[in-house]
Image: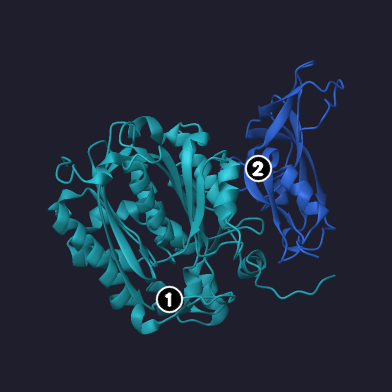
Amino acid sequence: MAAEGAGSRPESRAGIHGWGAYIPVYRIPTRVIAAEWGWPDHQWKALNVAEKAVAGPDEDSTTMGVEASLNAIRRARIEPSRIGAVFFGSESKVYAVKPSATIIAEAVGATPVTMASDLEFACRAASEGMKNSIALVSSGMLEYTLVVGSDTAQASPGDVLEFSAASGAVAFVVGPRDGAAAVFEASYTYVTDTPDFWRRAGKPYPSHGEGFTGEPAYFHHIMSAVKGLMEETGLKPGDFDYAVFHQPNGKFPVRVAQKLGFTIEQVKQGLVTPLIGNTYNASALLGLARVLDVARPGERILVAPFGSGAGSDAYSIVVTDAIEERRGLAPPVDYYINSKVVIDYGLYVKFRGKVVKRRI
Amino acid sequence: MSGVGGLRNVEAWRTRIPRYRFLGARCKSCGKLHYPPLKACPYCGSRDLEEAQLPRQGRLLAFTSVYSVEEGGREESPIFVGLIDLGVARVVAELTDVTDPSRLAAGIPVEAVFRRISEEDDEGVIVYGVKFRPVPGAGEGD
């Protein structure tokens, strides 16, 4: 589809120079979790999540973020010292106080002359980093930024959340329009104070406000952001080749697409949660990375991450000719999806530190 | 005491850059590379060294397993330690993502990954660095 429309907005001065993914090798099938806790089949089958990715015992949101970042920088083909900001979006930070962003910045070689911060907005924090990056680049304040979304999502054993709470990371190098593999056209953000999902300070597992989860939170915020974007730009669902939405499970992104007038054909390439579970801050952005793995120059992508609490951003992105030379510089998302080892529930609880031990 | 970890944290902080970025040292006298970087070349003793980026892909030459692990590492037991041929250098590093030890063998391709190396306890500083894992899809780990 021809890319016309919102070309004069500030967003159009920024683009994606590199994208990178990382998914741990371990998988636990949803049916195994259900059997462990005695859930009936309909409870897990309705989510459309076959299995979820599980971080190994020496992995965390920081280590996965570094791997995804290295892949993004390989594709961007830039000296890491040119990165002027590292934004790390996660709700499974390894430190309550001390930035993970400095560890990532140091590991990839972006230090010391760089901004670095951890952002928190449930699953939407990395997307806020993306929007901040667009602002910093389009204003000319910075040349390149690194946006990282990474989570080892927590779920209390036996909670329905355990079916989908997964581990994975994604990263993007955002920079000027010239030389970008894909350029931003427009963005629209919609935020309210809605208590659909939260984790209190010091608590190991999150809580979910059942009545708020679907319509008042996920659907209302994503639909408001996407409709806002389309109203401001004049774009319609048919103008997009791909549409990627936040994916707390395998059914919500399909339903929100249909409500907004998108087809399953536009959505399916960006669906990753049915294959690896919900990677929270990496969820929709990993879907975007999977689209960039196959998208052709001139194609237009809608991406709409969502975070509980609650808010959503909608972005319109147009792929450029430069994408072809970047694609092969790092492993595609499907390489990580297909590189897997299935583990049982015992190994899963040991890896995720859910076993109470005494010092020996 | 203020600051958990004391001297161990200082040592980890001083060595973080080569450990995070997998940087070795090249001897300007004999040309050989080594890792982790030392103040003098372990081959000829020269102190005329320069920083060198090591390749992140290599082949496993030999390995051993450690069943008695430090407190805090029980979830990772047993630990596998490998001698890895990077072409330009040979390094000793911990192996990770070893899901089937019977498939560890001399010659399998391995790749560097950024992982947790150690932590004193759940209040201390986490030490990160490079480990190696069997390349997924190329033998063990697929």
Residue that badge 1 annotates: A197
Q: Identify which residue is drawn at 40% across, 73% down.
A: A45
Q: Quadrant of the N terminus of chain A?
A: top left
The chain in blue: B
Residue drawn at (20%, 67%), measured in percent from left and top?
Answer: A259
Residue A226 as seen in the image, left or right of residue B42: left
Which residue is painted at 79% across and 20% down in the image? Answer: B48
Residue A205 relative to residue B126: left or right: left
* Image coordinates for residue B4, horizontal then vertical, percent: 77, 62
**Do circles 2 and 1 both sit on a common chain?**
no
- Residue B94: x and y in percent read 74, 46
Q: Which amino acid type is marked by label 2?
A: Tyr
Q: Which residue is mark 2?
A: B20
Q: Amino acid at mark 1?
A: Phe
Q: Is residue B48 left or right of residue A70?
A: right
Q: Is residue B84 visible?
A: yes
Q: Residues within 10 Å of mark 1 (few under 14, many from 20)?
A: some
Chain A in the picture: what colour? Answer: cyan
User: Which residue is situated farthest in the top direction here?
Assistant: B29
Coloring applied to the structure: by chain
